[in-house]
Image (tube, rainbow, N blue to C red):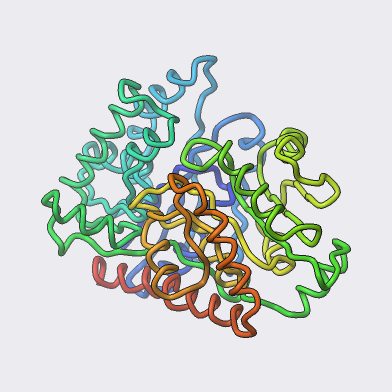
């Protein structure tokens, strides 16, 4: 089997590193996989300047061929050009590489796989299949009349009809797909997995990082890794941070690791009433994220409620031994927290909900085994074995 693996994020994007690279390793380990051609969508001069594939494991079967997006002043023209040109390039690449199957990561990449498959006649599969159009609309990124929304809705329907296999990231979404008529045999739930060797809690790393950040033993450190706006809370996020600061008082410290400009985030934190001296905002390479997680005591998840989500951050937080503060209705994870612990949920329609959730987080932090309990959730619910089993079911 020769796989053309289609990613939609840039090669060096943290999501590529944290979600695609581990699956390439699983596929490379299969005896029936002869070769894997990885392709990613590269937009902008900066990302296209360095397209060297650097994998965190020995590479014996994987080559890299980027899809280079052209810059247009109008964003919509970028998308039109991409979806006209890329399927043709992917079909040609599949022929040149002798590919026998297309495998896409995420519904936007799945759209490219569907269009390429129509040209080259190869079967295709989509992992991390999520209701991308709906959560972009629900997050206010796309309007119901936005051409991007309408096209993505259509493309997701075509993937449901034509893919030989879909791997939704949440069981709740799998059930919805079955209700829509997708055969159960074509569906395997595969939550976003975490590398326990990289993110597993390390007491020595915690001491070292807290000393480097000058956090005392009494400091209560909350951490958030990710973006603001769209499918993530924005104005609400800073109010949640402010409520955490008010709850824990002078002992509270906040770490925000984000790609947003630090000055803008710092200004919003100050406007929300947080002490600037108690907040660290920076852009950190993915390799440094485990160090900052080790320094923290609990984590914020700011995803808006959506049944088809499996945020990669959840596995990384739990693996690092961190209880999570998150909204109700986020994929399967909110239900796991409510049933099994490992955090606390809130409902922003209920005025006292965040405060009550912070009380529960504080209670968890006082339990001597709370880190081990969170780590156990990562092992139980975010193991790469789920992906290995799905590949065996579809390809075995």
Residue 20 visible at all:
no
Q: Residue at x 35, y 58 (%)?
A: 169
Q: Nearer the viewer, residue 384 or 294?
A: 294
Q: Compared with residue 11, is residue 370 higher up or lower down, i.e. above or below?
A: below
Where residue 99 sits in the image (x, y, percent)?
A: 32, 53
Q: Residue at x 20, y 40 (%)?
A: 158
The answer to whether residue 253 is left or right of residue 351 is right
Quadrant position of residue 28: bottom left
Where residue 21 sits in the image (x, y, percent)?
A: 51, 60
Q: Nearer the viewer, residue 289 or 110?
A: 289
Identity of the residue furthest to the top in this view: 73
Number of numbered discs: 0
Q: Compared with residue 305, is residue 2 higher up or lower down, i.e. above or below?
A: below
Q: Nearer the viewer, residue 206 or 79?
A: 206
Q: Residue at x 64, y 50 (%)?
A: 243
Q: Compared with residue 79, is residue 341 higher up or lower down, i.e. above or below?
A: below
Quadrant position of residue 84: top left
Q: Quadrant of the C terminus?
A: bottom left
The answer to whether residue 392 is left or right of residue 343 is left
Identity of the residue furthest to the front in this view: 352
Where residue 18 sits in the image (x, y, percent)?
A: 54, 58
Residue 366 visible at all:
yes
Where residue 375 sits in the image (x, y, percent)?
A: 55, 77
Q: Quadrant of the N terminus?
A: bottom left
Q: Nearer the viewer, residue 119 or 160?
A: 160
The answer to whether residue 338 is left or right of residue 296 is left
């Amino acid at each position: 089997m020769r796989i053309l693996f289609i990613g939609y994020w840039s090669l060096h994007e943290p999501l590529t590193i944290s979600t695609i690279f581990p699956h390439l390793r699983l596929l490379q380990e299969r005896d029936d996989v002869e070769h894997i051609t990885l392709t990613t969508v590269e937009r902008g001069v900066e990302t296209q300047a360095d397209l060297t594939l650097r994998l965190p494991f020995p590479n014996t079967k994987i080559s890299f061929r980027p899809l280079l997006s052209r810059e247009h002043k109008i964003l919509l023209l970028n998308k039109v050009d991409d979806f006209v040109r890329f399927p043709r390039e992917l079909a040609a690449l599949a022929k040149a590489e002798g590919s026998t199957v297309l495998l896409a990561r995420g519904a936007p990449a799945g759209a490219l796989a569907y269009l390429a498959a129509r040209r080259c006649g190869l079967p295709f599969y989509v992992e991390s299949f999520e209701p991308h159009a709906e959560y972009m609309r629900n997050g206010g990124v796309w309007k119901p009349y936005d051409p991007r929304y309408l096209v993505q809705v259509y493309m997701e329907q075509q993937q449901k009809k034509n893919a030989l296999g879909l791997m939704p990231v949440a069981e709740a979404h799998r059930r919805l797909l079955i209700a829509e008529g997708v055969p159960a045999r074509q569906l395997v739930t595969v939550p976003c997995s975490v590398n326990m060797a990289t993110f597993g809690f390390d007491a020595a790393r915690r001491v070292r990082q807290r000393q480097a950040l000058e956090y005392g033993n009494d400091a209560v450190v909350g951490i958030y890794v990710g973006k603001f706006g769209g499918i993530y809370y924005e104005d609400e996020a800073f109010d949640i941070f402010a409520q955490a600061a008010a709850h824990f008082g002078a002992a509270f410290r906040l770490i925000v690791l984000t790609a947003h400009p630090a000055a803008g985030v710092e200004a919003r934190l100050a406007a929300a009433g947080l002490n600037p001296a108690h907040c660290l905002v920076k852009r950190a390479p993915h390799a440094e994220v485990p160090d900052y997680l080790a320094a923290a005591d609990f984590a914020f998840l700011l995803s808006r409620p959506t049944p088809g989500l499996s945020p990669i951050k959840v596995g990384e937080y739990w693996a690092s031994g961190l209880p999570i503060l998150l909204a109700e209705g986020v994929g399967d994870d909110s239900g796991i927290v409510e049933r099994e612990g490992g955090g606390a949920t809130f409902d922003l329609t209920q005025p006292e909900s965040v405060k009550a959730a912070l009380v529960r987080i504080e209670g968890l932090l006082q339990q001597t085994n709370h880190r081990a309990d969170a780590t156990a959730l990562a092992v139980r619910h975010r193991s790469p074995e789920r992906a290995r089993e799905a590949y065996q079911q579809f390809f075995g």
